[in-house]
Image: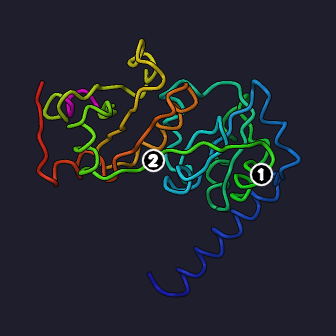
Amino acid sequence: MNEKLVKSVFRRLRGRAQRSLERVPQLTNRDFDLLQSPRALLLDLRPPLAFSDAFIPGSINLPGFESPALLKAVGMAAARSIYLVTDSAHAVDRAAKFFDRFDDMQIAGYFPGKAVQDWRAMRGAAGTIEHITADTLAVRLAAWKTVVADIRDAAAFRRAHIPDAVRIPLSDLTGALAGLPFETSLSLVCEIGTLCSFAGSLLWNAGYQQLAIVKGGFAAYVEHGLPLAES
C-alpha cells in the first residue's frame, strides 16, 4: 500500500470518527443522574487495566467496543439508552455504527475517561478489580484463599483446567455461582486474559466484588508449569 493511499485511508477514518462525535453528545459530571435510569447501560470502552484501576459502579467493560457480540451473549441486547466512557473517537464511531442498526438501543452520549475521577470526587468510591500473576494465583490457591472462576468454553475446560476451578459460562455467570457468598474471593481466568474484564464487570455489578483477574489467562498459568486437572 503506497503512502498516499495510507494517508487517504486515515483521513477518511478521522473524518468518519469526527462525524460520529458530532452526533453523539459529550456528557459531563452534571449528567451523572442520567445513569440512574433503569434503561441506562454504561459501557466503559477503556483498556482493561485502566478500567480495573477505577470504574463507575454499574459500568460494563467492553474495551474499544471491539466485541459487541458479547452484549447479546449475556442478554444485554435489549431496549436501552447507551452511555459510553472513552477518550477514543474511533471507539465512539464503532459503537455508533453498531447501535444504528437497532430501533430500541441508541447512544445517548459519552463521558470522557476523566469522568471516572469526577465520579470518585462527587459520588464516592469507584469500583476496582485486582490483576494478579499466575504465580500469585498459585500461592492463594495453596492457602485456600480464592476460588478460580474459569470462563473458557466447555471443551477447553474439559481438556485441562486449574484444579478445583469452577467453570462459569458467560451466558450464565451468576447462575453458575448461585449459592456462593458474595464475599468469596474469585480469581477470573479466560484463555489469554482478554474476556476477564468484561466478565469481571458483570460479576462486580452482581455483588461479587472480591475479584482478581489472572494476567495472561490460562495460557500464562500453563506457561508457568503449574498443576493442571482434566475432566
Determine which of the numbered discs, if any, sits on residue 88 in the image.
none
- Relative to 122, 200 lies left or right: left
- Relative to 61, 27 lies left or right: right
Instruction: Write down the region rendered in magenta.
Output: 153-157
Give the residue drawn at x 65%, y 70%.
12
With respect to residue 159, does 85 lie above or below?
below
Give the residue drawn at x 14%, y 35%.
160
Most common secondary structure along the magenta stretch: helix
| Residue 114 location (% of width, % of height) | 72, 59
- The N terminus lies in quadrant: bottom left
User: In front: 124, or 59?
Assistant: 124
Q: Residue furthest top?
A: 179
User: In front: 7, or 206?
Assistant: 206
With respect to residue 17, does 62 lie above or below?
above
- The C terminus lies in quadrant: top left
Asked whether the residues under the numbered discs 2 and 1 touch, taking CB atoms below 8 Å apart as contact, a structural biologist would say no
- The colouring scheme, among rainbow, by chain, secondary structure or one colour, is rainbow
- Relative to 67, 231 lies left or right: left
Instruction: Identify residue for label 2.
Output: 130
| Residue 178 location (% of width, % of height) | 42, 14
| Residue 41 location (% of width, % of height) | 68, 34
Instruction: Identify residue for label 1.
Output: 121
| Residue 49 location (% of width, % of height) | 49, 56
Q: Residue furthest right?
A: 30
